[in-house]
Amino acid sequence: MSLGNEGFFIYMTNNEKTIISITGASHLLVHSLMLTLPSLIPLIQDEFNVGIDTLGFVVSISALFFGLGAIPAGWIDRYVGKKRLLMIYQLGSAVSALMVVFSPNFFSLVLGLSFMGLFCSIYHPTGLTLISQRVSNVSKGMAIHGMFGSMGSALGPLSAVLIAALFSWRYSYLFLGLLNIILFVITFFSISSSSEIKNKINNNLKVKTNVPALIYYFITNSFLGMAYYGFTTFMPIHLSTNTNEFLPVISENLKAGLFPTLVFFAGMIGALIGGKIGNRFDKKLSFMTIIIINIPIFFLVGESANFSLILFSIMLGIVYFSNQPIGNTLVSEFTDNTNRGFIYGLGFFISFGIGSFAAGLSGIVAVNFGVSAVFPFMGLLLLPGVAFAWMMYRASFK
């Protein structure tokens, strides 16, 4: 698969290939860790005897820390260095995963997941700033980066349910923790500290930060974040319980990992398409158009079942995740180089921190109206996002 006629790493320098590979692997593991819990909800629900609404709020707590830590991470990267921050994320998330593995009660489980969200929050402002500053073709770099994130979102739930079926759900977190320790060692030897100062490809010091456009972008992204947490938290349950007539030989627990994996693999395709769209068309109008297309698909996912549910869910994966490389590139275009890490951190706090409340809110919707009602609800949340995306487009010309 290629991005245009250039392929993945063709025409990249060795330093760019290293940056893309390390950030890509880190992005994969971040999303694997954060999306393992939703696929294990039935098993954790049984072990700790808690309701689905309670676990929805647990996802919200972890996601809140995932957003909260992004602001200081984006600010201190200029003092600590991006390599050190990457390694702090990798080691910290590995230790947090071990806390989950050995959690003796529900409180310690929530504590481990909270620390996991906090350490994982370091990644996005650090990784995205590295790409925007060290990779010449930012749209292409963001597309590859988004593809790795979608791969993690796909493989995380699938590996979780397979490992849980063979051993225990706790071993799912052990596996991901060990992978982060390996990545910690690779990062230590692969990225030289001197490269943080040299090789400034995209030095936009002369670009003035467009504050109004950024504000409208952040507000828009908060609605996208709410939709993200709503559908990723309850998609495993929705796909496993509403596909009884499609492949009935597969158990619901396995479907909870397998079918969402298909959706997130579709997200990989979406990220590549988004990178291509970002290079070819106006990014701001493309960003708004993709949000509009998402809305009816959310309704279709909520109202369908069996094969049509799988089909519309795959469509949602392609369309929703196609906006990620476009949005991340827009931030780099709206922001001067010196403040970019902080701005990425602020953006992810707004998207994931504020958006995290949607998981708990969706749990209330699921208990009172059924899990399928969560998806039209997420679609409605995107309507104000369209209005603010239009305001962002207008503000970008000022």
Image (cartoon, grey):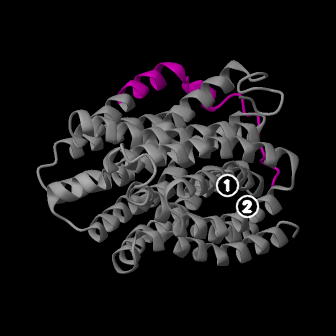
Give the secondary structure at mark 1: helix
Q: Tell me what residue is drawn at x 54 percent, y 65 percent.
A: 304
Farthest residue in the left direction?
104
Horizontal side of 332 relative to 381 (left or right) equals right
Upstream in sequence: badge 2 or badge 1: 2
Q: Quadrant of the C terminus?
A: bottom right
Give the secondary structure at mark 2: helix
x and y, in percent, of residue 39 in the image: 36, 50
- The residue pinned by badge 2 equals 290
Question: Which residues make up the magenta segment?
Answer: 181-207
**What is the three-letter code of the residue carrying label 1?**
Val
Q: Tell me what residue is drawn at x 64 percent, y 31 percent.
A: 197
Q: Tell me what residue is drawn at x 11 percent, y 50 percent.
A: 104
The local crowd at label 1, few if under 14, some if 14 to 19, many if 20 or more residues have their Cα within 10 Å, is many
x and y, in percent, of residue 127 in the image: 57, 41
The local crowd at label 2, few if under 14, some if 14 to 19, many if 20 or more residues have their Cα within 10 Å, is some
- The residue pinned by badge 1 equals 319
Is residue 284 a member of the stretch shown in magenta?
Answer: no
Residue 62 is at least partly visible in this image: yes
In the depicted structure, whether residue 164 falls above or below residue 252: above
